Amino acid sequence: MPRLGSAQRWAAAAGRWGCRLLALLLLVPGPGGASEITFELPDNAKQCFYEDIAQGTKCTLEFQVITGGHYDVDCRLEDPDGKVLYKEMKKQYDSFTFTASKNGTYKFCFSNEFSTFTHKTVYFDFQVGEDPPLFPSENRVSALTQMESACVSIHEALKSVIDYQTHFRLREAQGRSRAEDLNTRVAYWSVGEALILLVVSIGQVFLLKSFFSDKRTTTTRVGS
Amino acid sequence: MAVELGVLVVRPWPGTGLGRVMRTLLLLLWVATRGSALYFHIGETEKKCFIEEIPDETMVIGNYRTQLYDKQREEYQPATPGLGMFVEVKDPEDKVILARQYGSEGRFTFTSHTPGEHQICLHSNSTKFSLFAGGMLRVHLDIQVGEHANDYAEIAAKDKLSELQLRVRQLVEQVEQIQKEQNYQRWREERFRQTSESTNQRVLWWSILQTLILVAIGVWQMRHLKSFFEAKKLV
């Protein structure tokens, strides 16, 4: 094997360190993200979602029931060993933050098994780790300039504005669904009651008339 | 949680051939473990629907990846090439705006033209019942809406933006999304108000009508019975 020059030896060393760095990267939690999903949960059904999370990642699960019945659902979050981290029955809205204690698949389930005929619409937002950086090569050791850090703080503020907007929209959807329910119920009830009133009152009169007609004939027969 | 391969730049490192293979493998492993999004299980004939309530002119990008349970190896493997998913997207008026079949891995995009609840439905196109072997299909799904759907690396490359310009572009997109959502909110609130006023009107008219019906029925009953009793010579 020919002797390596100093530059080549330096390059080989850099290659070895690069390999070790990559191996180290496997242990570091990668850039995370958020999954925001709205789905329909039929009655007596259970829907589970799974996600592979690395150890040490801070995660947040937030859910809200938008339409259906009493606007409540059962929620359950389990770690890879099956240990229950969060369990609540018949909740309308909740938020749960946890840090992943081990690598593996975390599972969370929403259950509507207690309901017999109402199906529910559930919204959830599962945030894993931090949002991915805007730039691929972002891992800067140098500090951000003033403009850039101003941009970052505006971005964070706008993210929270969008988050509040989403929650407001969901609450408004809930209110609107209740109002539309009320409207249809009032319409059906009005028509139904009008028919019942007419039928009952006309029926009363004819029933009363029939009492008097029969009694008359019986009394005359008994008399003779 | 959509990390594409383009995130990491693989520079050619000098070294022996075996070292290079090891590095590539480690790199792929790192990317693969980060590439899995949220997943759920779906049955063979089951149809799973997701709802996205969005304002108009908003782009939605969905990525999915399927895996089938392999009984011999007792783990989930990437699905056979023949297995695909049928994606159907309906707009708030229940009109189908996208109905296409994709392979075992796919990406679908649509832009909303009316504000409201859009429904995205997925079901597998398998016709052979033995394909699933009684198991379930694992579907990794990632749906990005509005500003999150933008690929900033691509925008930076296309428009040749500096880092600061790209950040400002992101802020502009976010603010536009907030504006659209506010407009949509105004439209929704108007609908809500119309529904409440309609309920109010209906309750008012119903009370008046009910009182009139009651009075009319009462009057008719008394007059009818009175004439009946007079005819029967009871009064």
Image (cartoon, coloured by chain):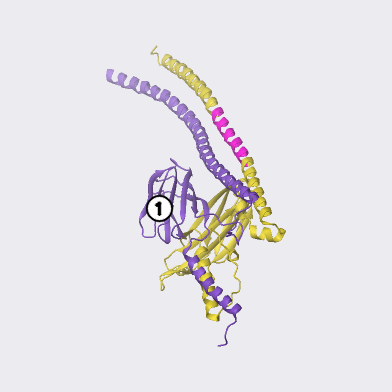
Chain colours: A purple, B yellow
x and y percentages locating residue A102 in the rendered image: 40, 60
Which residue: 62% across, 37% down?
Answer: B186
Q: Amino acid at mark 1?
A: Leu
Which residue: 55% across, 81% down?
Answer: B17
Label 1 residue SS: strand
**Residue highlighted by disc 1:** A77
Query: Looking at this rendering, what residue extends furthest in the bottom direction?
Result: A1
x and y percentages locating residue B62 in the rendered image: 58, 58
Quadrant assignment for the C terminus of chain B = top left
Whether residue B181 is visible:
yes
Q: Which residues are magenta?
A: B184-201
Q: Nearer the viewer, residue B115 or B164?
A: B164
Label 1 Cα crowd, 10 Å radius (few <14 / some 14-19 / many 20+): many
Q: Main secondary structure of the magenta part?
A: helix
Query: Looking at this rendering, what residue extends furthest in the right direction?
Result: B159
Which residue: 59% across, 74% down?
Answer: B13
x and y percentages locating residue B168 in the rendered image: 67, 50
**Relative to B188, residue A218 above or below:** above
Q: Nearer the viewer, residue A116 or B193?
A: B193
Q: Quadrant of residue A224?
A: top left
Would you say residue A23 sits in the magenta stretch? no
Q: Quadrant of residue A13?
A: bottom right
Whether residue B113 is visible:
no
**Relative to B122, residue A68 above or below:** above
Describe residue B13's horizontal placement relative to residue A201 as left or right: right
